[in-house]
Image (spheres, coloured by chain):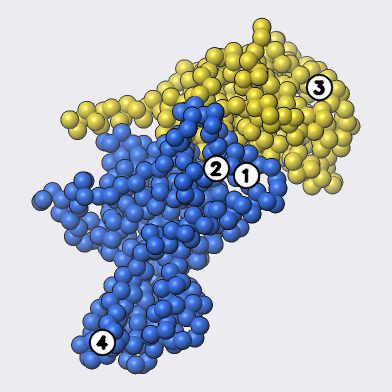
Chain colours: A yellow, B blue
Amino acid sequence: MGYKIDEYLRQDKLPHIWCPGCGHGTIMGNLIRGIDKANLDPDKTVVVSGIGCSGRASGYMNFDTLHTTHGRAIAFATGIKLANPKLNVIVITGDGDGAAIGGNHLIHGARRNIDLTVVLMNNHIYGMTSGQFSPMTPTGDNATTTPYGNIDQNFDLAGLTKASGASFIARGTAYNTRQLIEIFAEGLLHTGFSFIEAISQCPVNYGRRNGLSSAVDMLKCQRDSSVNIRKWDSLSEEEKKGKFPTGVLYKEDKREYTEMYQEIIDSVQEEAK
Amino acid sequence: MRDRIKLLQGDEAVVEGAIAAGAKFFAGYPITPASEIAEGLAERLPIYGGKFIQMEDELASMACVIGASLSGLKSITATSGPGFSLKQENLGLGMMIEVPCVVVNVQRVGPSTGLPTSPSQGDVMQAKWGTHGDHPVIALAPSSVKETFELTITAFNFAERFRTPVILLLDEIVGHMREKVVLPNEEDIEIWNRKKPEVGPEDFNPYQETDGLVPPMPNYGEGYRYHTTGLFHDKTGFPRGTNEDAKNLMDRLMAKIESNMDIISLYEEDIRDDDEIIVLAYGSTMRSAINAISQARKAGIKAGWIKLKTIWPFPADYIKEVGKRAKAIIIPELNRGQIIKEVRENIFGNAEVHGINKYDGTLIKPEEILNMIQEVK
């Protein structure tokens, strides 16, 4: 099917600034296809981003767009959404922006189950600042700030957001565009806090220090280590090693924050009559 | 009439002022001595269809009110010293992207946790220089509960009119003190709302001056589909990374405040032609100053007072003139001397300048000011 790419991208702002081989452009392209597939009204759609490579995505997308401070995009988006619940509010963040400096807002956004769609582009590194380790850099890997190897453990972001109360949790890869478009469309239409981890590749500042200097090799790695959630449970523990499930990992019908607040307004105003 | 007579504390007057100004959104985080503002607005806002949210931290609260304002609601947050420090980065973004909102700081003694329940005026300089880089600042400081109500409305009006965050600096005395206030009729309150674009989306540039230095601002969701960033940007809202854009934007941000000093700079004075000693104060300290002046005058001393209601931008030209006719200026402050530096800088040694400074959580008594007046007369 044809997607309204031209209408939803600010053509005059392209080409984008991301490095050759970066997965962020693919993921942004898929998000735009997902927005189109979900048939969102572009005049009622707001994209909020933070700081870092992922943060630049908002500037290329033709909606109301807000490029904020480092890590705080979900908090800005919370104000935008609660002030006008009719808006579709999308947050684009990264693994440093969303899981490190903005980790508190991620868990509290999920806890409120406020109707935001959070896309976390996970490239396992601080790319814009040239390769310092993030909370998603695998233990043992190399980064500019781990000259003797990374001893930090990673977050399980799907598990973290589930425990925090998110009602839609999914994971996809830059490699599997078809699946990622489906995930985005479903997440955008879900009412409640939707968290989508999109695995990206950074050949320049992550791959090259860790034996994967070509984007093609990194995409092959995404292909070989991802398993559709429908098949995941049938794998043995041995087979699961070094792999991760993709698709919609969790979905729940749950009361949404702005709807609950509207009920308070309605009841308070009724009483005041 | 009777239902407009209230016994309010300063924090409650912020709540009343915000409602009167048309505030529809509050985001905040609990902190002494400002929590009463959050509690009051949590109860009142939904009655008017407004929204209240308690955020996970101070940074999120500042971010949230900026977001709500971009959606079109008049927005406010309230905090005290430690929280004010945490808000600074997002406050800077609000100044840079020109988002109207009100930030209340009920000052307590710092640094750090300090004396959480005691008054201070220690954040005067933080209000001006708290966020990094040069930036425009409007900060107002009420000295009574009635003035708190009035200046809360003024803060919203300045925020909307000049498209910028406005800081309302209370201190713990003003915030917790109770006084009688007669609230004005709704129709007697002047309200300003942000200017909306008169052109359609195709001809719209979000940071283009139209008439005056303040660009019109649409709400999210109205079809303008514009971009906003904390990077230096041109009139289109997009960053180009040029030095020219950086200078042009900074110059306009400063000029929109500086060229409107006649509107923004609020102060009162009681200075007779032959008064030689002037006490300049703001906030709760003003109350002791006025009392001390009246005692001094009874004793035949030629003394008068200046009350600053707008602290930033500082009324430099006015103070220059005062410096020419005064023999001495006395500045009582609940800090180690912050506004006194601005005064010294602007009077060129024409008058003696003396500070009375307390930073231990106690207030400055009228007698302490009177003693200083007698010393310098």
Task: Please tell me the numbered disc located at residue A210.
Answer: none
Check whether the beta carbons of the residues at disc 3 and disc 2 lie within 8 A of each other.
no
The answer, for residue B366, to whether it is visible in the render is: no
How many dots with numbers? 4
Distance of mark 3 from mark 2, alpha carbons? 41 Å
Return the residue nearer the eye: A16 or B375.
A16
Task: Please tell me the numbered disc located at residue B207.
Answer: 2
Residue drawn at 39 percent across, 89 percent down: B327
Check disc 1 and report its element: helix, strand or loop. loop
Up-down: is B258 above or below A9? below
Q: On the image, numbered disc 3 is attached to which residue?
A: A219
Up-down: is B353 above or below A91? below
Q: Are marks 4 and 1 on the same chain?
A: yes
Tag in front: 2 or 4:
2
Q: On the image, numbered disc 1 is attached to which residue?
A: B233
Up-down: is A49 above or below B188? above
